[in-house]
């Protein structure tokens, strides 16, 4: 778990339960999930999540349309707002980070260096396990 103090509030912004599932050898993308608890006294916004293992990253939202077709779209700024005292959960079937063009397939048991960037809290570096849940 990673913690970062925020100068604008009396609490902390905490990142927990980060993980990435392993991927097949030829898959062009991987996913990263995490939970952000905003224990500070002010709202913040998730701006980006990056890793040197990813060619690029995007934060996506998964939705199911009226025909029960699952679709992924870039997350909106509103979806990435974290009100003071609230949390943002990224999980399969919901918000998630897409790791596009990884340098190598993510393998069960390895660890990823990840940087999570916030509007107010700035950059927070975490280590994320690759594990199949």
Image: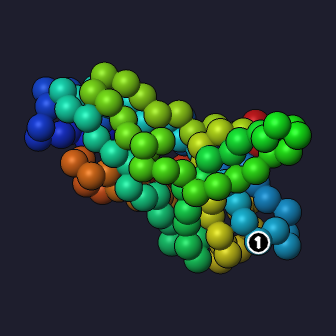
* Residue 7 placement: quadrant: top left
Q: Nearer the viewer, residue 69 or 91?
A: 69
Q: Residue at x 57, y 39 (%)?
A: 90
x 18%, y 27%: residue: 41
**Residue 103, quarter of picture:** bottom right
Residue pictured at 14% horizontal, 31% vertical: 9
Q: Position of residue 112 (x, y in %)?
A: 55, 58
Q: Is residue 94 left or right of residue 26?
A: left
Q: Is residue 99 visible?
A: yes
Is the residue 126 above or below the residue 42 in the image? below
Horizontal placement of 53 versus 80: left or right? right
Q: Position of residue 131 (x, y in %)?
A: 71, 45
**Point 88% across, 40% down: residue:** 67
Q: Is residue 97 visible?
A: no
Residue position marked by numbered label 1 in the rendering: 28
* Badge 1 element: loop
Where in the figure is residue 59, as x and y percent of width and height? 55, 55
């Amino acid at each position: 778990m990673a913690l970062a103090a925020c100068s604008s509030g009396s609490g902390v912004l905490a990142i927990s339960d980060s993980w990435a599932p392993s991927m097949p050898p030829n898959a062009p993308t991987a996913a990263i999930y995490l939970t952000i608890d905003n224990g500070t006294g002010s709202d913040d916004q998730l701006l980006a999540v990056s890793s040197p293992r990813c060619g690029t990253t995007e934060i996506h939202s998964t939705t199911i349309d009226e025909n029960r077709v699952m679709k992924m779209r870039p997350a909106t700024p509103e979806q990435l707002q974290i009100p003071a005292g609230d949390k943002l959960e990224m999980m399969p079937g919901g918000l998630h980070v897409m790791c596009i063009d990884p340098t190598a397939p993510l393998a069960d048991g390895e660890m990823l260096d990840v940087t999570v960037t916030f509007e107010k809290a700035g950059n927070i570096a975490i280590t994320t396990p690759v594990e199949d849940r």
